[in-house]
Amino acid sequence: MKGSKLLIEKLKLNGVDTIFGYPGGVLLPFYDALCESDLNHILVRHEQAAVHAADGYSRASGRMGVCLATSGPGATNITTGIATANMDSSPLIALTGQVATNLIGKDVFQEVDTLGITMPISKHNYQPQSAKQIDEMIDKAFYIASTGRPGPVVIDFPNDVLKEDINVDSINPDTTTPGYKPTRKGNMKQVKKAIDIINKSKKPIILAGGGVILSNASDELLEFANLTSIPVATTLMGKGVIDEYHPLSLGMIGMHGIDSTNKAITECDCLIAIGCRFSDRSVSNLDKFALNATKIQIDVDPAEIGKTVKIDVPIVGDAKVTLQEFINEVKHPDRSNWTDHVTKIRQANVEQLEYNNIPLKPQQTIKEIMDAVDEDTIITTDVGQNQMWMAHYYKTRKPRTFISSGGLGTMGFGLPAAIGAQFGMPDSGVLSIVGDGGFQMVIQELATINENDLPIVMCVLNNNYLGMVAQLQKLYNDHVYATEFTANPDFVKIAQAYGIKGERVERPGELKETIQNALKSREATVIDVVIDEEELLPIVAPGNSLDDMTMDFSNLEE
């Protein structure tokens, strides 16, 4: 068979049934073979949407997302999505087309050095020089992308490799990866040392990150927390590891986290970080972060341990495996004094919110969103104020139901991620929360939604601003510059032009019913939610400690 057909067969053998892509000249051999296969190809309207959709598919379903782009500008258009997945440890396979092997390096039409470009923003990359290498490279790519610390793997296919005829019976693939052997089981000496510290601690806190979700360790985390009565804080990527209505759930820490959670972290005497990398948005001022705590870090990636925060007990290992060890060995002390104290901190720092304002306050929209959806509804967000309002106020009930771009902060992520999530979990309701800025970066994907009859509900939190940049400039740069949209389109009419239902919400009480009706109808809907352009997010100012959060902006001078 030809290399292109072998590629498709290998994808199917690795469990792939859906691929998000955009064709180009060097990929014609692949698309010829695709016509003869039952692989489901989703034609997006921009390559960036293909990789974000593959990412959303992976995060929602736990299965491998796959995207495809042609050489040159096609390959460069997916680099933002590859970097997004890499920062958030999201496993996916990015396939790109390339000019023929004898033309590589000669600056021919639509040639770029895809390997060189993607090397620093992917977990690994390959470029087969003959069709016989396709067999082993596909298997290795799936193994590397999904094991250890997950991430994106790029495979760049020269055109002649896809066209090459090959006798598959003559292939003897070598799928070993001698230089790559991720550690799953932590060093038992370190595990026992950590358990001893935990057993003796009076004021411990668990900080759970996205690694807990990626290792499917949410059940183990909950069991460990319940056994030990240890409160659980999360990072942005960790939202959903524990039901945020659970008594031990503290919510999100960080720059836009929960004030009481940040205060509790500052007071704890033992911090157990599981599957998180201590990003700057989480810890704020390193010199003032959890100064009273003995710090235990569990991470499958040894490069992350101690990279940002000095760690007292490092454990390299898988979160699920390590938590199982903890559960078997840990004691069950009475920590009611600590949990009661944390509860008092939470009660003393409850935000006083207004829910009947016009224009709508973002907090009101989040409350109505929570009232409108069930615990299985998958939420995707874009990046900016819309994202942080959701992360701060929306209570997530289950893992893999809150999907957001964390490390790279990629505007334009939310809508295509919702497309991927809907394909990955076709029976689930999918609600995409976006700002008017990020939505317009990928608005053409409404055509993809309509063409595939996807019942995605999109809430555009519309304040006519690049809200996050405007907030930072207003608070710290003494002005707002070039962040106002003076010519936003009518999003309802835009939706209708794409054959999608459009609604506008401007008054309290309207959004809940509108979302419920849209989800019930299983009909794609864009909801233009007009919100107060002056509303600002709670924030830890750059350089401040986590327990110094600005909540009230009423005295802000114009």
Image: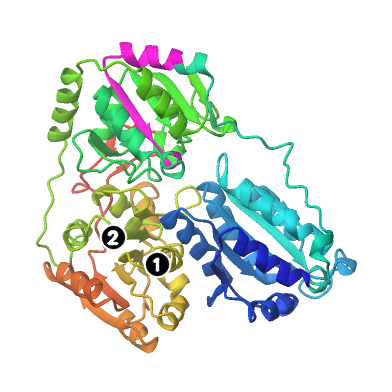
**Residue at (18, 35) in percent of width and height:** 247
The amino acid type, in three-letter code, at marker 1 is Gln
- Whether the magenta-drawn stretch holds residue 208 is answered as yes
Residue receiving disc 1: 422
Q: In the structure shown, which secondary structural element does the residue marked by tag 2 occupy? A: loop
Would you say residue 476 is visible in this rendering? Answer: yes
Q: Which residues are magenta?
A: 192-211
Q: Nearer the viewer, residue 356 or 75?
A: 75
Residue receiving disc 2: 377
Above or below, 302 relative to 256: above
User: Please, which residue is most extreme toward the left here?
Assistant: 356
Mark 1 neighbour density, 10 Å: few (under 14) some (14–19) many (20 or more): many
Labels 2 and 1: the sequence-earlier one: 2
Quarter of the image that includes the N terminus: bottom right
Q: Is residue 71 left or right of residue 94?
A: right
Image coordinates of residue 282 in percent, x first then y, are 40, 37
Image coordinates of residue 207 in percent, x first then y, are 36, 32
User: Please, which residue is most extreme toward the front here?
Assistant: 169
